[in-house]
Image (cartoon, grey):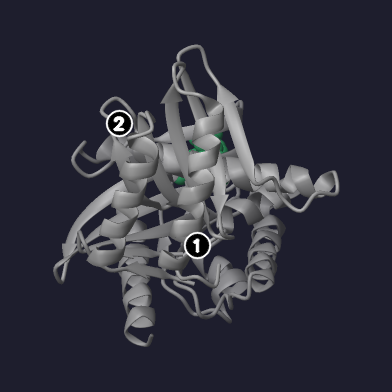
């Protein structure tokens, strides 16, 4: 849930990176953390990690400057993608204002992407949020593997599997190299701030 | 779902935290919501990352609530961690908020408990009552 502090003209929103295990959610935050300056980002918190698998969540707060006189504070979270951690995912999703779905381009992950998106839809529905209402952006990650000998899904295939019905913005990217990471963040932040302020105006 | 607080409400929250907690000896008092937003922080958190503390406290409370369900409780109303020099006390404010109080070893837990209960009663109507 967003919080607006009229004494500081500040809005705080929560954006969650969701998607299948090992898809690159944590890598997105790590890239942002090292690429952004201190004045924009706060400290990154990673709790409960086993190897590089997230067991609870990662957290990165950002101060994105001013939009129409409001200063924008955004909290980025990642969920654990592994199927068995659904209770934790639900916890992290609490009060979410915008979502980045990080899909894995690896061919072997085709089904996992679809399952994870379906899991997101269900978890949101349990909190009375319609996946078609909340700001959502897709990121097709690991595009840097194109041309290697690892089989990957085409962007068309990913669109067909994940975005046929939703019709939201999507970005090809490589969280490892930083491609598409900022574009994804910019789009979801814009959408989320718009969504939050529209809800405000209709109060 | 979203929370909008006027300057007046924020000022009210600040004065309640200052009077009932800081003046009673607490080092720091923070109000956060259960999705991890930091609503107000008071005291001297110079060396403290309050934004991270807000996020972690919300998650901690959420996880503990799940544990409560597993053992057939609804929720735990408060959590307390005792350190060598600094103690931290978390308590629920309505359904949606958490009050975090940091205090040193020369302040009694009983006093903090008593005052947090009073603060909670004052905060609930400011935060929208229906909580
Ligand atoms: N080649 C390539 N590898 C990537 C990319 N993004 C992430 N990886 C690698 O994929 C692995 C998993 O990445 P993470 O960011 O930990 O994945 P996650 O989505 O956070 O996974 P969980 O925490 O288990 O849900 C790591 O070894 C990353 O280095 C990418 O764009 N390209
Ligand atoms: Mg991770």
Split into 4 quadrants, where in the image is the C terminus of chain B?
bottom right
Q: Residue at x 35, y 50 (%)?
A: B16
Q: What is the chain letter for disc 1?
A: A
Q: Residue at x 61, y 36 (%)?
A: B79
| Front residue of A121 and B129 | B129
Question: Which residue of the protein is positioned furthest toward the left in this rendering?
Answer: A69
Mark 1 or mark 2, which is nearer to you? 2
Q: Tell me where residue A2 sits by quadrant.
A: bottom left
What is the number of callouts on the image? 2
Residue A96 numbered mark, or none: 1
Q: Residue at x 71, y 59 (%)?
A: A111
User: Where is residue B41 drawn, in percent x and y?
Assistant: 33, 44
Task: Give the residue drawn at x 25%, y 65%.
Answer: B8
The circle on residue B45 is 2
State whether residue B80 is above or below residue A200.
above
Front one among A105 and B66: B66
Quarter location, residue B76: top right
Image location (x, y in percent) of residue A154: 53, 62
- The reply, left or right, for residue A138 in relation to residue A203 is right
Disc 1: CA contacts within 10 A as few (<14), some (14-19) or many (>=20):
many
Image mark 2: chain: B
Answer with left or right where residue A70 lies relative to residue A58: left
Circle 2 — which element?
A: loop
| In the depicted structure, whether residue B73 falls above or below residue B130 | above
Q: Secondary structure at mark 1?
A: loop
Frontmost residue, B107 versus B27: B107
Give the distance between the C-alpha atoms of the residues marked 1 and 2, in whole angstroms: 27 Å
- Position of residue A127 measured from the top left corner of the image (x, y, whole percent): 64, 70
Q: In the displayed orientation, state which residue is furthest to the bottom.
A: A202
Numbered mark located on residue B49 in the image: none
Judge: label 2 CB < 8 Å from ligand 2. no
Question: Badge 2: how crowded within 10 Å, few (<14), some, or many (20+)?
Answer: some
């Amino acid at each position: 849930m967003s919080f607006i502090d009229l004494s500081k003209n500040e809005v705080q929103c929560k954006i969650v990176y969701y998607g299948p295990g090992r898809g690159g959610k944590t890598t997105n935050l790590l890239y942002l953390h090292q690429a952004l300056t201190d004045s924009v980002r706060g400290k990154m918190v990673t709790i409960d990690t086993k190897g590089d698998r997230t067991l609870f969540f990662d957290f990165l707060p950002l101060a994105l400057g001013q939009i129409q006189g409001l200063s924008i504070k955004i909290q980025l979270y990642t969920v654990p993608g592994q199927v068995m951690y659904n209770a934790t995912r639900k916890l992290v999703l609490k009060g979410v204002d915008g979502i980045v779905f990080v899909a894995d381009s690896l061919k072997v992950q085709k089904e996992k992407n679809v399952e994870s998106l379906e899991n997101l839809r269900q978890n949101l529905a349990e909190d009375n949020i319609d996946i078609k209402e909340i700001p959502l952006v897709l990121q097709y990650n690991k595009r840097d593997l194109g041309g290697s000998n690892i089989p990957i899904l085409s962007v068309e295939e990913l669109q067909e599997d994940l975005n046929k019905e939703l019709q939201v913005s999507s970005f090809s990217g490589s969280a490892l190299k930083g491609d598409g990471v900022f574009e994804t963040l910019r789009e979801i932040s814009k959408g989320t701030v718009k969504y939050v302020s529209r809800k405000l105006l209709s109060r | 779902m979203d929370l909008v607080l006027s300057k007046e409400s924020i000022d009210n929250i600040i004065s309640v935290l200052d009077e009932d907690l800081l003046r009673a000896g607490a080092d720091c008092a923070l109000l956060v919501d259960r999705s991890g937003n930091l609503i107000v922080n008071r005291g001297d958190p110079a060396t403290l990352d309050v934004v991270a503390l807000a996020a972690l406290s919300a998650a901690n409370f959420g996880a503990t609530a799940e544990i409560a369900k597993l053992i057939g409780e609804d929720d735990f109303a408060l959590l307390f961690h005792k350190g060598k020099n600094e103690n931290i006390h978390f308590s629920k404010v309505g359904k949606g908020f958490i009050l975090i109080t940091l205090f040193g070893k020369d302040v009694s837990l009983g006093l903090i408990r008593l005052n947090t209960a009073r603060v909670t009663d004052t905060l609930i109507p400011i935060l929208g009552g229906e909580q």
